[in-house]
Image: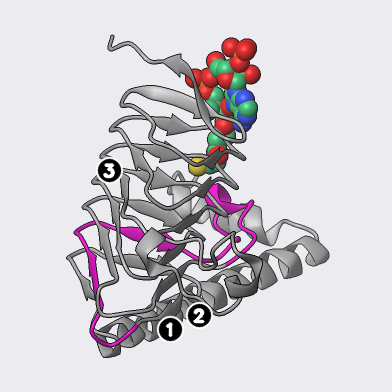
Amino acid sequence: MEDSNPMHRKERAFFSLPTTLKARFLLYAFFSLFHRTLNLCLHLFNISRMKISGIQYGRNFKTEGIIIIDIYPESEVVIGNDVSIISDSRRATSAALAFPAKFKTFSKTSRIIIGDSVGLNGTSLTARSRTIHIGAGTIIAPNVIVVDSDFHIPWPPEQRRYYPGDEHDHDVLIGNNCWIGMNSVILKGVHIGENSVIAAGSIVTSDIPENSLAAGVPAKVVKVYKSV
Ligand SMILES: CC(C)(COP(=O)(O)OP(=O)(O)OC[C@H]1O[C@@H](n2cnc3c(N)ncnc32)[C@H](O)[C@@H]1OP(=O)(O)O)[C@@H](O)C(=O)NCCC(=O)NCCS
């Protein structure tokens, strides 16, 4: 009588493969296990670094790959529940990732607040003296930079290098349920309304209203989404 157990059928199928394919399959299984173990170790490393830096994070927090963490001791970084931070381009949805995720604060007035269910992919967040707030449910595609500061003043040139110009820093607010496309840059003082989309490669220099698609350099509203 024929054995109908699916596990036994899979085993028979595996053993009937040519030797080179069997070896490739076993090597693939080995490296995939190795990668999972490595990611678990890196997650433990990330959360240890976060704890040491005073970063608060909520439940079901996930990280993959090494996150760059450079936090001024008295600044505030708060990460909500169900947040995932990907810093490893091996993940299919992060295949275009060019740099690791980064959290940097410069002073005791710097704040980075990440809402619940946010997904960051190699996102670089730098708060020099103000607040960067990312609303709940927002997803940020690979290689996005968000800053609250220009870090130098454009004029006069003799002061550009050394004058800090913190007075020009401004809060950045990305609303709930936004989607920021790959390689976008969000500059100081920008507020992006909830549900809005920033198209890939945009540079956002001024406010974007809710429920809209903004694209280009500088980003302009090109479409308003209507509720269904
Ligand atoms: C924004 C996006 C999702 C398209 O959204 P959409 O609602 O289908 O928008 P449309 O394709 O109808 O485009 C609307 C207008 O914006 C323009 N546009 C779309 N994306 C643009 C971009 N990246 N830069 C400049 N203009 C863009 C279109 O050319 C179109 O202009 P037109 O009305 O003059 O023809 C897509 O363009 C995009 O940026 N994809 C990348 C997403 C990403 O980063 N994914 C990574 C994984 S998280």
As displayed, is residue 33 above or below residue 225?
below
Classify the position of the C terminus by image quarter: top left
Badge 3 amino acid: Gly
Tags 2 and 1 in contact by the CB under 8 Å rule?
A: yes
Q: Mark 2 sits on what residue? A: 38
Q: Mark 3 sits on what residue? A: 137
Percent from the top left, x then y, of residue 97? 61, 57
Q: Alpha-carbon distance for marks 3 and 2?
A: 28 Å
Tags 3 and 2 in contact by the CB under 8 Å rule?
A: no
| Element marked by disc 1 | helix
Which of 170/226 is in front? 170
Position of residue 54 in the picture relative to residue 28 (left or right): left
Q: Earlier in the sequence, mark 3 or mark 1?
A: 1
Badge 1 amino acid: Cys
Mark 1 CB near ligand 1 (8 Å cut): no
> Nearer the viewer's eye, disc 3 or disc 2?
3
Q: Alpha-carbon distance for marks 3 and 1?
A: 27 Å
Which of 190/167 is in front? 167
Write the residue at 28% across / 33% down: 194
| Element marked by disc 3 | loop
Write the residue at 23% across / 46% down: 136
| Residue 19 in which image quadrant | bottom right
